[in-house]
Image (cartoon, rainbow, N blue to C red):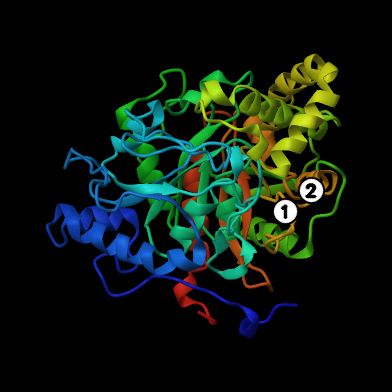
Amino acid sequence: MTTTHDVRRVHAFGDDALADHDAVEVAALIRRGEISVEEAECAAVARVRTVEPTLNAVAFAAYESPRRGTDPCAPLYGVPTLVKDNTEVAGMPTNHGTDAFRARPARTDGRYARQLLSTGVTVLGKTRMPEFGFNATSEFRLAEPVRNPWNLDYSSGASSGGAAALVAAGALPLAHGNDGGGSIRIPAAAAGLIGLKPSRGRHVDGEAARAMPINIVSEGVLSRSVRDTAAYVAATEACWRNRRLPPIGLVEGPARRRLRVGVLTEHILGGEVDTQTLAAVDKTVALLEAQGHVAEPISLPVDSRFAEDFTLYWGLLASLATGFGRVAFDRSFDSGQIDGLTRGLRRYYARNIARTPGAFRRLRRTGAQYARLFDRHELIVSPVVSHVTPRLGVLSPCVPFDELIQRLRNFVAFTPLQNVTGTPAISLPMAMADEGVPVGVQVASAFGDERTLLEVAFALEEATVWPRIHNHEGC
């Protein structure tokens, strides 16, 4: 067992313009003239530079030429952030975490980047991610891994792992992420953050999501406070709102409604969920029951082949990324430089390609199967992942593929369901593990019902104390 004395931590919190403020407070200070946009920006750059040699979380630095918000009335005007390295921002390269090519700076902003920039944030660069976002840890074929600031020997999750590391360490109030199988929620759980995966269609889809046979990608942020996530959602909705979904608006606190809560701890492959993760789920359920909600255990409502079908789709995406790399990314794309996970997924798909039609039919049916849970419940509480975030190396792309894919399927046992069904879910930092890293719990709701998730997240935030790295022993 890891003790406090074994834990190596790093953070950048200090007595500067950012202090320990969240994004909402930073924006308010700027509006009141108590700090300037430049002061917030300089503080963030100094903080990132302080922790970056240890965390390895920055893919591209634009400190000398940041993209500043142009509308001083925007809700998050002047809040410094970084964007994940799979999203086009004019003047910055987008390398998708791979060594297979070297991107040129983008000429224009991508579709989703325009919505993100409308919130008023200042973009200081790009955060690192695993190759094409396929892994559940931000580790690489050749480069140093992204480290978890809570315990530098552990993973910060993925694929928004660089974003999670910088926000948890206090370098940024919030950072952009996206989620195609858990890639906002998993790093949020690993780093003690709030990570909301919105409903399909809630935001402007990026270019890659629009090209997918089944769109599994949602965009959002990782933050240290529920109100930051709520403010960001409301700000993006002010830019563009899908009229086919109910509006969310600005959620500012808990609702006083009695909800029916389904508790799901069943591993999708029949494996075990570790005791510390189960304890965090139990704590969450107890807090909800103390607030008057009614909870009961439920069973997984999907086809027994879901994990195999999702892995096949994962393999298809790897095949598309590498097979069309010279067209999709850059003429210099060299498939000989892809990592072991991407190569293994491509081979896996080639061996099982005949299963594609059946897998697609079953995955598309999953939405209706999952929706039936919400005939009886407003919320589903579950683990985010099946065990505490692992030590670096356990999920490395250098691990032999057959062993690595089994480890990944055992670890990422809960989050892909919402990606396939297009439904929302949020990861909340509900506990600390013996290893000195946080443990997240997932709360999910019906399609289009992010408002209930945010209201419940506010209520849980009031009822407990989120872990904060600068307030813990061993820092």
C-alpha span from label 1 to label 2 = 6 Å
Can you tell which quarter of the image residue 390 is in?
bottom right
Q: Position of residue 148 (x, y in %)?
A: 56, 63
Q: Position of residue 417 (x, y in %)?
A: 69, 35
Name the residue at 68% across, 72% down. Answer: 435
Residue occupied by mark 2: 404
Can you tell which quarter of the image residue 26 is in?
bottom left
Between residue 192 and residue 147, name the one nearer to us.
Answer: 147
Amino acid bearing label 2? Leu
Estimate how packed mark 2 is, as few (under 14), some (14 to 19) or many (20 or more) residues with alpha carbons within 10 Å. Answer: many
Asked whether residue 292 is in view, the answer is no
Horizontally, residue 369 falls left or right of residue 69, namely right
Between residue 449 and residue 435, name the one nearer to us.
Answer: 435
Question: Relative to 174, is 325 above or below?
Answer: above
Name the residue at 73% across, 25% down. Answer: 366
Horizontally, residue 35 falls left or right of residue 394, namely left
